[in-house]
Image: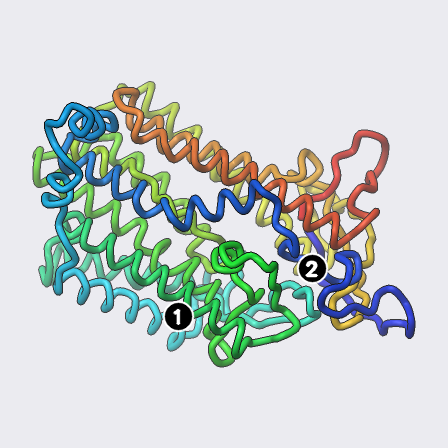
Amino acid sequence: MAAKSQPSAPQPGSPGHATNGKAASQGQWGRAWEVDWFSLASVVFLLLFAPFIVYYFIMACDQYSCSLTAPLLDIATGRASLADIWAKTPPVTMRAALLYTSWVAFQVLLYTMLPDFCHRFLPGYVGGVQEGAVTPAGAVNKYQVNGLQAWLITHLLWFANSHLLSWFSPTIIFDNWIPLFWCANFLGYTVSTFAMIKGYFFPTNAEDCKFTGNFFYNYMMGIEFNPRIGKWFDFKLFFNGRPGIVAWTLINLSFAAKQQELYGQVTNSMVLVNVLQVSCSWQTGRGWGAAHLSLWPPQGLYLVYHPVQLSTHHAVAVLLLGLLGYYIFRMANHQKDLFRRTDGRCLIWGRKPKAIECVYTSADGQKHRSKLLVSGFWGVARHFNYTGDLMGSLAYCLACGGGHLLPYFYIIYMTILLTHRCLRDEHRCASKYGRDWQRPAGGAGTPAPSP
C-alpha cells in the first residue's frame, strides 16, 4: 500500500510525461486499457445473468423450499413451465417502490447533510473529511467519511420502530423481498447507465477517464475513476457503501424477525449469521469498502425456510472462524491505512514498519514518491486481507449446516471474485510501480508489498 505521495516536478522530455493512450508505465495505471478474455467474459456474465441467478435462488426458496434442482426437474419433466414459475413470482408493487425510494433518499440525506461526529469520540476511528489516494491523473479527492454514523442512526431508528414506535413490521423487508429485489436492480442499472453517459459527455475529471473500446467492460467497470456530482457526492463511495451495505444488517434482522414469527424462536445459526455479517457491514459501511452484494449472501433467507440449530461446539467453531477472518481482514486494512496516513511513521506489530521506496508517474506528468508496506500482514502475503475475507465468507456458509448447497454459493462466488481481483491488483501495481513492484524488501524470498 502506498503511503501519502509527494509530487515532484516533471522533467521536460522525460518519459514521466504522459497523455491518454500512452504506455501504462507513463501514468496509465489504474484500470486496464486492454481487456483480457477472462475479465470480459466475467463482466458480460455478471451484467446479463447476475440478477437472474439471484432471482433463481430466491424463487427456489419461495417456491421449492430452497432446492436448486427441483425447479429444473419440474421444467424438464413438464410438471411446470417457466410461465408457471414466473406467474407465482411477486411483481414490483407501489409499496415496494415507495419503500426503496424512501430508503435510498434517506441514505442520501445521511451522506450529504450530516458531517461525521463518530471520529470525535471513537478512538482510532478515521472519519470526517479525508483525502483519498492520488488518482492516475494526479488528482487527490476529498471524502466525507460518515458511513459508521449513517449505520448507527439507521439501526437506532430500526430498533426504536421495532420496540417502541411500531410504524411498520420488522418483517417488512422479507415480506417485500422479491419486489424490493426488482427495485434494487432497476436502480443499479439506471445508475450504471447514467455513470457511463456522464463519463462520455460531462466527466468530473476528463484525465481520469478510461475507454477500453469494449462497451460491456466500460459499462461494468466504469469510465470515470471517481465519478462525482458536485464537490462531495461521490458515486463509488455512496453506492458501494450505503444503499446495499447499510441495508445488509437490516435485511438479516428482518429475516430473524420472520423466523421468530414463523417458529417462535430465533435459532443460534441465525444469530451467528447476524453477528458475523454485521462485522463485515461495519467494516465496509465505514465508507472505504466495496460491497459484495452484487450476488448477495443468501444465508439469512435460507435460514427462514430451513431453521438450523447448531450444536454448541459447531456454533463456537464457526464464530471463532468468522471472528478470526474479520480480525485479519480488519487489521490488514488498518495497517495499510495507518501506514499511508502517517507516511510510515508508526508502529506495526510493535516495530517500525519496513517499506520499499518507489516512484510512479501520473497522467499529468507529475512524478510521485511513495512507499510500499512490507511489514505486518503485508509482509506475510500481498493480499492477506482477502484471506480474512474468505474466512469470514466460509463462516457464513458453515453457520447454515450441511443440508443444502445454496448457502455455500457465496464462498464459491467470493473465491472466484477475489482470485480475479488479486490478478487485477497485480497487473495494476506492476504497471504503476514498474520494477519497484518486484523488489524484495530485506532479503531473498521476502514477499512483495500489497497494493
- The residue under the point 26% across, 65% down is 103
Residue type pointed to by label 2: Thr
Image location (x, y in percent) of residue 47: 41, 50
- The residue under the point 55% across, 64% down is 223
Q: From the viewer's perspective, is 5 left or right of 184?
A: right
Q: Residues within 10 Å of mark 2 (few under 14, many from 20)?
A: few
User: Looking at the image, can residue 322 be seen?
Assistant: no
Location of residue 141 (image quadrant): bottom right
Residue type pointed to by label 1: Tyr
Label ID, residue 111: 1
Number of on-image labels: 2
Which residue is denoted by mark 2 in the rendering?
Answer: 342
Location of residue 27 (image quadrant): bottom right
Looking at the rendered structure, the secondary structure element under dot 1 is helix
Seen in the picture, residue 285 relative to 58 is either above or below; the reply is below
- The residue under the point 40% across, 75% down is 112
Image location (x, y in percent) of residue 59: 19, 39
